[in-house]
Image (cartoon, rainbow, N blue to C red):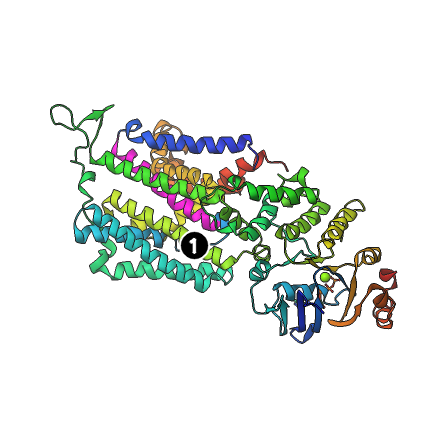
Amino acid sequence: MEKTNGNLLVKGTVFLVWAILLFAPFLFQDVRSTEVAARILVFIVLVSSYDLLIGYTGIVSFAHTMFFGLGAYGTAIALKTMGPSWSAVILGALIGLGISLVIALAVGLLSLRVKAIFFAMITLAVASVALVMASQLSGLTGGEDGITYRPPSIFKPAAKLLTDENGKVLRIFGVKMNGKIAAYYFVFFSSLILFCVMLRLVVSPIGSVLKAIRENEARAEAIGYRVVAYRTLVFCAAAAFASLIGSVYAVWLKYTGPDTVLSFAIMIDILLMVVIGGMGTMWGAVIGVVMMTLAQYYLRDLMGVVADATHNLPIVPELFDPDRWLLWLGLCFILLVYFFPTGIAGRLMAKGEPA
Amino acid sequence: MRAPSLSTKDLTINFGGHVAVDHVSCDFYSGELTVIVGPNGAGKTTYFNLISGQLKASSGTVIKDGEDITATAPSTRAKKGVGRAFQLTNLFPQLTVLENIRLAVQAQTGDGWRAFTPTNKLTALADKAELYLEATGLEGVAKQRAAALSHGNQRKLEVALLMAMEPDIYMFDEPTAGMSMDDAPEVLELISKLKADTRKTILLVEHKMNVVRSLADRIVVLHNGALVADGSPEQTMNSEVVREVYLGNAGVMA
Ligand SMILES: Nc1ncnc2c1ncn2[C@@H]1O[C@H](COP(=O)(O)OP(=O)(O)OP(=O)(O)O)[C@@H](O)[C@H]1O
Ligand SMILES: [Mg+2]
């Protein structure tokens, strides 16, 4: 690809996002902002790994949250039963990962040969089964209520990472060096590492093969690529990334339930993020996640401000009533998809390319 | 007599009663360029599809260097050295010309499974891709997307993909169809250079008689799916059966 302005703009933006995320606990010193930053970090991996499927390879799957959930529940259940320790986190993550890989391999080998639409239906069915099982096996999963547990001791809010001369928790730029900070940087570095691995993957020869399969499956096969094998591999890899970041999210949240890691609402969020950001670029995933997460958390507040500021005008405050935030969010999506059918990154990066 | 590099034995395919390729038995040898002719709908492309695996034979076998490959996937055949270009341009439209060619190269070198080495660090790959870019005269458009190319350049890229696979068996399906008077000779020149390599077996579907005359070592005639003539260019071109097949198509054979 050419080094064009659009290209630089997108990469620069993504770089800036990572820089802000790195310093987020210092830049925004409130609980909610840290929650938002951690959620962005987790979703960057979740959405980029989904982009490996939909954007790079052209595989539509609705089972991505299932793998996310398997990682999260694996860790959650291990932490609950074994008590708060690193060995519980690691064991739980590995069990979640193992189950994810087995399911991904089975679904992949059995059904990646069929037409894309049937494959999508199969993943939908499998994901539904997983959702039902999570609520049925309530002894293990806590059913609809989910599970609450304690994280390893270093992540406990009371944990002191650094202390001052009086033995009190040290503050750097006013931020307490406690377990919460440790947990945030655990999420940050996990996400960064996984994202970099994926970036590496897509610029390697295998990344080109995945794109070739998306572009022209028959020709990819004709020049010597076993399409089913590549598809199955990428499906398993995406499942592994989702599962691992699910485990990380479980450690961060100290709670795991259907609404945080398994529901179809999350699947829809992932789809919207990847579409808005731009499919098949990896960078787009980051942009999509940031925009959508910020909108989900702050659009309501913003509308409240607008409604207040305009309270003596007719109609306007009505329109911007914070309770209508979902309507506005929906409207934004429609406009974005209409004006940026290839997503924000897709549009910007294509612009400077020779026609 | 030496062993054929590729043979088909009673190769047949049946599309719901319509027999598109009908018990075709034919041996091909390395160092030989065979032109396959026949009127529209004769089954030439379908015959290629059966050899390279895009279609599954209803009956009969395909044998490459003594090995029965009839039941294998197209990718397996490609890896075993059966390569083909398509009559209808069949590229990776949103990828660049360079990326298209590199894909064909790395399929053969086995680099396709590499997941953690950036492609731009694999210089052997780049060098080989460069070679075929130049060979096909596409170096000037290397960074353009395949979809953005002119028709002539798309046809060249189609040929470049096959060349970059470096197979034992080259199957060209009307490579110059729709090409300009400037571009066609370039591609034919490439094919004739390939002919100089005696390890290669070349199958070429071509309508233009001047091309057939200048390149063919041998001509095979298909008609209604069946092989109706096979021999040296002089033999086949003058045979009774070929005149019959092309009756009313005289212009094509002239
Ligand atoms: N997938 C298919 N399903 C049904 N019929 C097919 C299929 N592919 C080819 N045919 C039929 O098989 C016959 C042979 O077609 P084919 O494309 O092999 O001819 P051809 O010799 O390559 O002709 P042309 O010179 O026009 O390229 C035609 O009658 C065609 O309609
Ligand atoms: Mg044809």
Q: Would you identify the image quadrant in which residue B216 lies?
A: bottom right
The subunit letter for the residue under badge 1 reads A
Q: Residues within 10 Å of mark 1 (few under 14, many from 20)?
A: many
Q: Position of residue A277 (x, y in %)?
A: 46, 40
- Quarter of the picture containing the N terminus of chain A is top right
Q: Position of residue A33 (x, y in %)?
A: 30, 33
Q: Position of residue A123 (x, y in %)?
A: 41, 59
Q: Amino acid at mark 1?
A: Phe
- The answer to whether residue A324 shows anywhere in this view is no
Is residue A352 located in the magenta-colored stretch of the structure?
A: no
The residue positioned 48% from the left and 51% from the top of the image is B113
Q: Mostly what secondary structure, the magenta segment?
A: helix
Is residue A36 located in the magenta-colored stretch of the structure?
A: yes
Total labels drawn: 1
The residue positioned 61% from the left and 44% from the top of the image is B129
The kind of secondary structure element at disc 1 is: helix
Q: Most extreme residue toward the left, as rendered?
A: A166
- Quarter of the picture containing the C terminus of chain A is top right
Q: Nearer the viewer, residue B43 or B81?
A: B81
Q: Position of residue B174 (x, y in %)?
A: 74, 56
Question: In the image, A268: left or right of A2?
Answer: left
Q: Most extreme residue toward the front, as rendered?
A: B1
Region rendered in magenta: A30-54
In the rendered image of this protein, does residue A126 appear above or below residue B178?
A: below
What residue did someone put label 1 on?
A235
Q: Quadrant of ligand 1?
A: bottom right
Question: In the image, A25: left or right of B209?
Answer: left
